[in-house]
Amino acid sequence: MQDISDYYRCTGKKTALVPTMGFLHKGHVSLIKKAKENNDITVVSIFVNPMQFGVNEDFDKYPRDFKKDYDICKEAGVDYIFNPEIYEMYNKSLTEVTVKEITGRLEGKFRPGHFTGVATVVLKLINAVKPHNIYLGQKDAQQNAVLKKMVSDLNADVIINICETVREENGLAMSSRNSYLTPEQKSNASILYFLLNEGRKRVLENNFEDTEAIKVEISVLLKQKHPDIELQYYEITDNDRLDNISDLKNYKGEVLISLAAKVGSTRLIDNIVFIKQ
Ligand code: AMP
């Protein structure tokens, strides 16, 4: 891969990287489209990264279908698929990339070590592919904050581009993990986007001093409609360091509302970001 990227760098062509774990869907395709619009060469990496899965997580059963991914990439006009083996990525490696503070919040509380796995693999992918641009989805807001900080702290020579979350008609954010859900669970899971929008409404009404009262109302709404869905967290933060917004009334700037919930045994994450004037 490095010979190819060196060649394109030398010829002055703009190269894009879309890092994925495969089992591609319309969300991934939207990133590929953006990459193709703004670059000469588009590389999609497909690598289910063991380092970002905890011991009791779904690494073994994570959905994989390389043939289908290949067809989707071909149809979308991808120039190269980078699909390394685990031993090629982690050959007796002793090095990890850890971004501090931001990684301890939200997902970090439930998935210790996850973002070290993400930051390490993405830096390795950046070094292998040497892209000018990298395309990430808003769907993984905390991952984006972590990777932005890593790129800036370590002077990585790449520009991060964030693309909107693509949703099902009922509002459920597209995700490879949605394949674990039954049709009924998929329908019920639309409540998550509803809860994010209810939170946004309350933030923008500006009648709440702090985020706690909003969070209580959101839990009540969920209990009324789908008591079987377990909300692991629902946080209202800034979109940079992901700090809880304590003085909500006087806060101005980007607001990130993010959540994780268990629908049956499937853990889903989602978020929205908007400006509070
Ligand atoms: P994954 O394969 O789940 O690791 O995701 C690879 C990239 O696709 C990440 O940057 C995700 O944020 C992005 N992505 C996943 N789902 C969506 C979606 N529904 N809309 C837009 N981007 C997405």
Image (cartoon, rainbow, N blue to C red):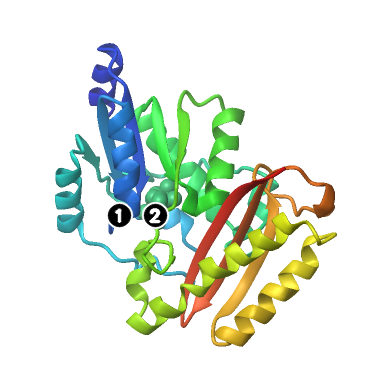
Instruction: State how far apart marks 1 and 2 are (Cα).
Output: 7 Å
Secondary structure at numbered mark 2? loop
Q: Which percent across, then down, holds residue 114?
A: 53, 56
Q: Position of residue 46 (x, y in %)?
A: 29, 48
Residue type highlighted by circle 2 = Val
Q: Are marks 1 and 2 in contact (CB under 8 Å)?
A: yes
Q: Is residue 184 left or right of residue 71?
A: right
Residue 146: image x %, image y %?
A: 58, 43
Q: Answer with the quarter of the image where residue 3 lies.
A: top left
> Could you tell which of marks 1 and 2 lies nearer the N-terminus?
1
Compared with residue 273, is residue 174 higher up or lower down, i.e. above or below? Answer: below
At x 30%, y 31%, the residue is: 37
CB of residue at label 2: within 8 Å of ligand 1?
yes
Asked if ligand 1 lies within 8 A of label 1, the reply is yes
Q: Which mark is residue 26?
A: 1
Q: Which of the image's four quarters has the N terminus?
A: top left
Q: Which residue is mark 2?
A: 166
How many badges with numbers are in the image?
Answer: 2
Q: Position of residue 137 (x, y in %)?
A: 44, 47
Mark 2 surroundings within 10 Å by alpha-carbon count, few (fewer than 14), some (14 through 19), many (20 or more):
many
Nearest the camera: 14 or 220? 220
